Amino acid sequence: MFKFILGRLAVLIPTFLGVTVIAFSFIRLLPGDPLELLAGERGMSAERKAELMQQMGFDRPIWQQYFSYLGDVLQGDLGISFASKRPVLEEFLALFPATVELAFCAIIIAVAVGIPLGVIAASKRGSFVDQSIMGVALVGYSMPIFWWGLLLIILFSGTLGWTPVSGRISLLYWVEPVTGFMLIDSILSGEEGAFLSAIHHLVLPSIVLATIPLAVIARQTRSAMLEVMGEDYVRTARAKGLSPFRVIGVHALRNALIPVITTIGLQVGVLLAGAILTETIFSWPGIGKWLIDSITRRDYFVVQGALLLIAGIIMLVNLTVDVLYGFINPRIRN
Amino acid sequence: MNASLIRSALLSLALAVTLPAQAAKSLLYCSEGSPEGFDPALYTSGTTFDASSRAVYNRLVEFVHGGTEIEPGLAESWDISEDGKEYTFHLRKGVKFHKTRFFKPTRDFNADDVVFTFKRQLDKSHPWHQYTPGTSWEYFESMSMPSLLQDVVKVDDYTVKFMLTAPQAPMIANLAMDFASIMSKEYADTLAQQGKKEMLNQQPVGTGPFLFLMYQKDAVIRYRAHADYWAGKQPLDALIFAITTDASVRLQKLKAGECHIYPYPNPADIDLIRADKKLKLEELQGLNVGYLAYNTQQAPYDKPEVRRALNMAINKKAILDAVFQGAGMVAKNPIPPTMWSYNDDVVDDEYNPEKAKQLLAGAGVKDLSLKIWAMPVQRPYNPNARRMAELMQSDFAKIGVDVSIVSYEWGEYLSRSKDVKRDGAVLMGWTGDNGDPDNFLAVLLSCDAVGSSNRAQWCNEEFEQLIQEAKTLTDQDARTELYKKAQLVFKQQAPWATIAHSLVYKPMSTKVKNFVVDPLGYHRFDGVDIE
Amino acid sequence: MTTTTVTVEQERSALREFWFYFSQNKGAVVGLVVFAALVVVAVFAPIIAPHPADFQYRDHFLMPPAWAEGGSSQFLLGTDAVGRDMLSRLIYGARFSLFIGCVVVAFTLLGGVVLGLVAGYAKGWVDTVIMRVMDLILAFPALLLALVLVAILGPGLINAIIAIALVYQPHFVRLTRAAVLAEGNREYVVAAKVAGSSHLRLMFYTILPNCLAPLIVQATLSFSNAILDAAALGFLGMGAQPPTPEWGTMLAEAREFILRAWWVVTFPGIAILVTVLAVNLVGDGLRDALDPKLKRS
């Protein structure tokens, strides 16, 4: 087992190095000069520009810049944002909880709704219920979520006025950012109604972000259940006269969950990509919006750092899923 | 399927969530983006200034609220020496700095604070010149302060002297700008002791109308009224910036009561806002100009008669309708009409394609082709450059000039369009910094600026003499005369086709009282009240 | 002579069997019909569309659809902010979406299959390098990587297609490689090898046809995902540029009107949803028909 983990890690290292090269070189390939953007219509004199280039270390050969960047990264220093002049890591840590909170709620919704739907569909295979659930799941799977988000905003925030338009909490509450997770901070703040307000703000964006993972999980659960229900031990359990609820709920579901868990793990990348769109639509202060803004500003270190961190997180999650899978299913290890 | 479930859950939530009782008067402002930081001298964007300099800080002199004129701020009065090279400021007494969670001031504002504010930008060996990585004093640099300002000296606790290398009439206006916001030296010293210099840019302490409480990136900035403000406490108790980058979301929030006022509405929403009884709309002529700059060093555009002929072919009225959707006015001068010295006697080129054709033929030019550069981004002076270029393309086609439209990424566009050898005419524009005509005419049209911000690459001796002389005079009437003449020369020489000055709109709830639209583009909340 | 007849007949019966299983799935048939209709609409757009896609009717800004109050039968689905007919733009938009899907699938299939065959067949360091690069691409969320790539190449439809095709590569490479590794030791391959077939012949003629099924399923998936991702890029301002009537771009332009004119926001989204749904239905049908394991149960 240990050897297996080591093997996976050994693969990760070159990938991570590759990711640093990509993150570093991509942003430098972007047309457009951050200094020119900074100066705007006024423009900047050649001497001033040279001075700033030197100050930021851009006058050195590109490979030197890369290696000093790599050195800094290994020491946990991701550089300074041009725009805010604050450390990239600090900004990331300030914004990341918002994205995590959103993604977490989305995955909770997706699992809580998706798995039961999949189980129901499988247990009533071929029926009208099954077909409807699978139909809805396929619609969800095919949904352009940026449009879906706009529709929900128009309906629930605009026409009906049930949900707030954007933001994480009503700003009239005074909530200190202790953990960065609004659901927790709002309780810590001790303000009455703050927690409900936070949930109220989370509902719509989480539903939008949950749409695709929910559909994937429901479909995956159904097919895993169908497979398991054909196995001998389930048939035996059924033959023994156990209640269908027990057969499906205990025996079949437990075994069907293994591939489903893998699927959930794989949704992390989907969620992070979806977060870019969802955050844009709901003005949600997370890393998705931050990254897009920084690309337009050519904020080199922010884009580099954000790409690196996002890729790092995805690789870690994939590793965890791999390892978990290895635990459950020893055949994989070889 | 589970829609009804979701619906009932949402409904119950909607009923359960009631807003907290508002004991204090809070104004919610849906700002358009996050400030880059809170030390205004490091930045150049209006978003940052709204959140820092205009809310938290004061300057020695201030722009009149809602105007471009100058009034006393932290300096009660000032004298200018005969040669125009020495400015002496007499400071206001008893001005209190903010008392916050992170800093308790022990003394009032004095000359040390003024000297600190400017020396840190001017003096390269000052301990605060490079106080956080990547520090650069952008506006100080671009207003040529390092070469203009010789020294800033404390005469006594309440007198400060500025020594210049040359007489400079716009100096006073410059000192009302954001980079001149007065910082607390005592706060800076405390931070230096604690080894937390970078906090100066994150937790501001000033003398201004609002006291900074907290900031969460991309989400919210909170302020409270400064109880000991030297000009009196504000009518508002709390000011909250709800950062909302998307304009249609801002409108929805305004309608839902999640904010009281917001900047930069979509032009498409203006009618909708006007029709809403609960909302009102303030508007003002912006301090800006949008123009098409020919390359006056490229044949045949080096001939004024060719440029004038082209100007005559542009149907500006159509451009205003299609591009600005009515939110603007036709420009005839390089400066906007709200600025002093605007010459209303200048007659704009008439729209007359026939005459334009004749003029071109008269100049011996035929089969002309022209590249028009269209910027890829929306700017205050030009909401849609691409559409504008397309309209010009069809206008010029009518006089037999073949136009091709080019565009680059914005950063590239800015740098390539500066090139003296640039091929074609470029769509550009400018938004004023300080309300002084010099800030338009010298920045955009002086000989010094050729190859940088003078994108017409235009250097005209007569014009140059007029604006350089105006810079050295302190008498505004005399300066006005010179600038008026300069505008006549400009029109006659036609280095640009002046296109439009845009209107700015501020939608707000009818509950908001006394909000004044600022011609300089600031969003100031001093004096604002809410029902 | 006899051998050819047999193969033709075998192929014919294989096709019949495929159609039998495919048509079992009602949804897939519906999807196929819708998809075929979309293809017809796209191909004959200039004939079907009542108006040119880019013509601006200056007197008809933001007209509601024909059935709504204030609508006119001249513009069935209404007009947009500059007076262009929505229906015609949507019809022309079908061309772009199908084009995006086709080109992306063609690129990824070609690139992915060649790389996968090479990796699986050559093994050794070639395999390692190819697979590490694919891991690298997979380390980023697809849309994010595509977004950065488009920013580098410059916003535009073609660049969006290139970026999307690039980020979809790894799935095809992995599938092909896995199939090659699995098939490589089968008897028929070994036999062909012994008989002295060339490497190219082995790769493309002997091995490839036997791992087509998962590739076809993956290709339909990519087709629908490509349409979604291209629309998302267009929505973020990085895909097709206005005035191209690409659906995502239309949505981005329409965003400022969401309070005023529901139709400019609603219809392009429905068009995307219906197209993607149709392709996914077909994909499900294909999987059922091609996957022997599911066929059995």
Image (spheres, rainbow, N blue to C red):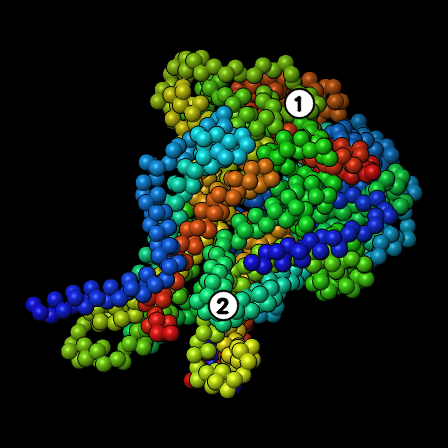
Task: Look at the image and tell me whether residue B480 can be seen.
Answer: yes
Does dot 1 land on a helix, a strand or a loop?
Answer: loop
Per the image, the residue denoted by label 2 is: A121
Name the spot of residue C197 as percent of width and height, x first: 17, 74
How far apart are labels 2 and 1 at the CA level? 70 Å
Residues at discs 2 and 1 both on one chain: no
Q: Residue furthest right?
A: B94
Give the total of numbered labels.
Answer: 2
Q: Give the secondary structure at mark 2.
A: helix
Q: Nearer the viewer, mark 2 or mark 1?
A: 2
Q: Residue at x 71, y 56 (%)?
A: B13
Crowding at mark 2 (Cα within 10 Å: few <14, some 14-19, many 20+): many
**Of residues C208 and C157, the one drawn nearer to the viewer in this rendering:** C208
Which one is in front, C289 or C149? C289
Task: Report in which chain the residue with disc 1 lies.
Answer: B
Q: Position of residue B184 (x, y in %)?
A: 82, 49
Q: Chain of mark 2?
A: A
The residue sitting at 62% across, 20% down in the picture is B486
Quick check: B400 above or below C64? above
Vertical position of residue C169 compared to residue B60: above or below: below
Residue located at (44% from left, 16% from top): B353
Name the residue: 55% across, 25% down: B320
**Residue B269 placement: quadrant:** top right
| Residue B337 tag number | 1
Residue sitting at the far front: A241
Q: Position of residue B277 (x, y in %)?
A: 72, 32
Task: Look at label 2 and name its amino acid.
Answer: Ala
Q: Left or right: A286 with respect to B355?
A: right
The relative height of residue A8 versus residue B347 in the rendered view (above or below) is below
Q: Position of residue A225 (x, y in %)?
A: 48, 74
Q: Residue flagged by tag 1: what amino acid is it?
A: Pro
Between C45 and C206, the one lying in front of the other is C45
